[in-house]
Image (spheres, rainbow, N blue to C red):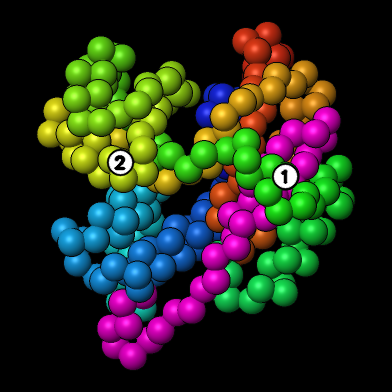
Amino acid sequence: MSGHSKWATTKHKKAVIDARRAKSFAKLIKNIEVAAKLGGADLNGNPTLYDAVQKAKKTSVPNDNIDRAIKRGAGIGGEAVEYQSITYEAYGPSGVALMVEVLTDNKNRAAAEVRTGLNRNGGTLADPGSVAYNFTRKGVIVVTGEGTTEDDVMMAALEAGAEEIEPHADGFEVITDPSDMVEVRKALQEAGLDYESADIEFVPNLKVEIDADTARKVFRLIDALEDSDDVQNVYSNFDLTAEVQAELEAE
């Protein structure tokens, strides 16, 4: 789940995390394959692949799986992968806006699974453009590391082109123009700051606050969408007040 970092602070039961781990691995592997296909197998010359591999490693995807994915994506050894990228616009409970990124080798299957997830959990597909206008593509780097301060991140990131720095459950989110993300990520690394992920995401231009009951419904919908192997990311424009966040964490 992406694009709404406050949800990352709410508690996930271990069983849920374990159940999703295999799906997470499969989606990370798919990202590596596509990055290698588009930019080649050299991590030094393909920053998109570099970031996809780093994210997979930080999620404990085995190195052998990563290496095989790079070779498949780059067409090394005779294997080849063909995926289609699709973005669906949707509305969730109380009109919450959703952008659903899909990477699939079967367009019909992916469309059916997205529709089913929406229909069964209070969501609806939206007309093209009716939701997307409220989102902008941005580079998002999640900086972690015990003892890392906002000043540390600002000193390293702003000069390299970062636009904004926001608190995140695991540290800080550094927002950049997509074209500046690699340079900002490198500047953070050179400053000795660890980062959890570096991705191009849909960032909402305007967020809407929702209550705890609506939040539960939205989370159920996002969970249902992410159950599909074809759904890579779900972004939303909801926001949680400190009170709502505390209520959810207490459950």
> Any mark on residue 181, and which?
2
Magenta-span inclusion, residue 34: no
User: Residue flagged by tag 1: what amino acid is it?
Assistant: Ser
Q: Where residue 130 is drawn, which disc sits there?
A: 1
Q: Quadrant of the C terminus?
A: top right
Percent of width and height locating residue 117: 78, 54
**Residue 106 lies in quadrant:** bottom right
Crowd band around label 2 with a 10 angstrom C-alpha radius: few (<14), some (14–19), many (20+): many
Mark 2 vs mark 1: in front: 1
Residue 229: give x, y in percent of width and height.
61, 63
Residue 1 vs 86, above or below: the answer is: above
Residue 218 in the image: above or below residue 55: above
Question: Gap between marks 2 and 1, in whole Å?
Answer: 27 Å
| Residue 8 in view (yes/no) | no
Can you tell which mark lies on residue 42? none
Residue occupying the point 26% across, 18% down: 154
Magenta segment, which residues? 73-102
Residue 58 left/right relative to 25: left
Q: Nearer the viewer, residue 35 or 220?
A: 35
* Residue drawn at point x = 48 percent, y = 79 percent: 82
Count of numbered badges drawn on the protein: 2
What residue is rendered at 17% in x and 34% in y?
Answer: 187
Q: Is disc 1 placed on a helix, strand or loop?
A: loop
